[in-house]
Image: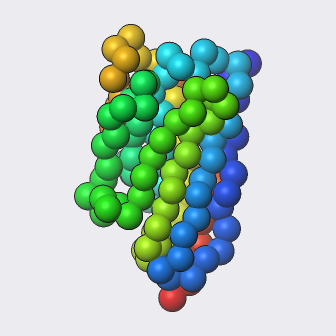
């Protein structure tokens, strides 16, 4: 049974930082690219960041470029999203996801491509 469990969310002031973690089990983690998405109530889930299977390539939504950094540690079977310079508009539930990729530098930016999802962790940024 595949499980992705996010942690690290919470309440932070604008300009602050948080690091989200996504611990994976039940899958060969090194065979997967990882992604981070966010969703507000009543809105569609939107792409935030993607990390390639080999942790070499990353891709970010324009609204987080230069502020957020995604990574994965295959030895720990964990993906991370370092979030700096947080803004109130970053307030959302954040989800990690895993996508099986044959290419070592493979990743995905569309939610429809992902195979597994975590349950989400809430990030709230106060002004």
The vertical placement of 125 against 30, above or below, is below
The vertical placement of 16 against 77, above or below, is below
Q: Which of the 4 image quarters holds residue 28?
A: top right
104 with respect to 32 (left or right) = left
Count of numbered circles in the view: 0
Residue 62, given in percent of the width and then of the height, sits at 26, 58
Residue 46, given in percent of the width and then of the height, sits at 39, 51
Q: Which of the 4 image quarters holds residue 123?
A: bottom right
Quadrant, the N terminus? top right
Residue 96, given in percent of the width and then of the height, sits at 55, 42
Q: Is residue 63 visible?
A: yes
Q: Which of the 4 image quarters holds residue 87?
A: bottom left
Identify which residue is drawn at 51% across, 51% down: 81
Identify which residue is drawn at 39% across, 40% down: 50
Identify which residue is drawn at 50% across, 16% down: 31
Extreme top residue here? 102
Q: Nearer the viewer, residue 94 or 82?
A: 82
Q: Is residue 4 visible?
A: no
The colour scheme applied to this rendered structure is: rainbow
33 with respect to 66 (left or right) = right
Q: Nearer the viewer, residue 10 or 104?
A: 104
Identify which residue is drawn at 53% across, 76% down: 16
7 with respect to 35 (left or right) = right
Q: Nearer the viewer, residue 48 or 53?
A: 53
Extreme left residue here? 62
The vertical placement of 14 against 7, above or below, is below
């Amino acid at each position: 049974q595949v499980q992705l469990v996010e942690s690290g969310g919470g309440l932070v002031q604008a300009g602050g930082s948080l690091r989200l973690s996504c611990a994976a089990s039940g899958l060969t983690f090194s065979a997967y690219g990882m992604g981070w998405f966010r969703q507000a109530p009543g809105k569609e889930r939107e792409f935030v960041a993607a990390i390639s299977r080999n942790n070499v390539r990353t891709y970010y939504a324009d609204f987080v470029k230069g502020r957020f950094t995604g990574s994965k540690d295959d030895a720990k079977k964990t993906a991370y999203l370092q979030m700096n310079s947080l803004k109130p508009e970053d307030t959302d539930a954040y989800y990690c996801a895993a996508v099986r990729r044959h290419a070592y530098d493979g990743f995905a930016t569309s939610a429809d491509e992902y195979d597994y999802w975590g349950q989400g962790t809430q990030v709230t940024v106060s002004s």
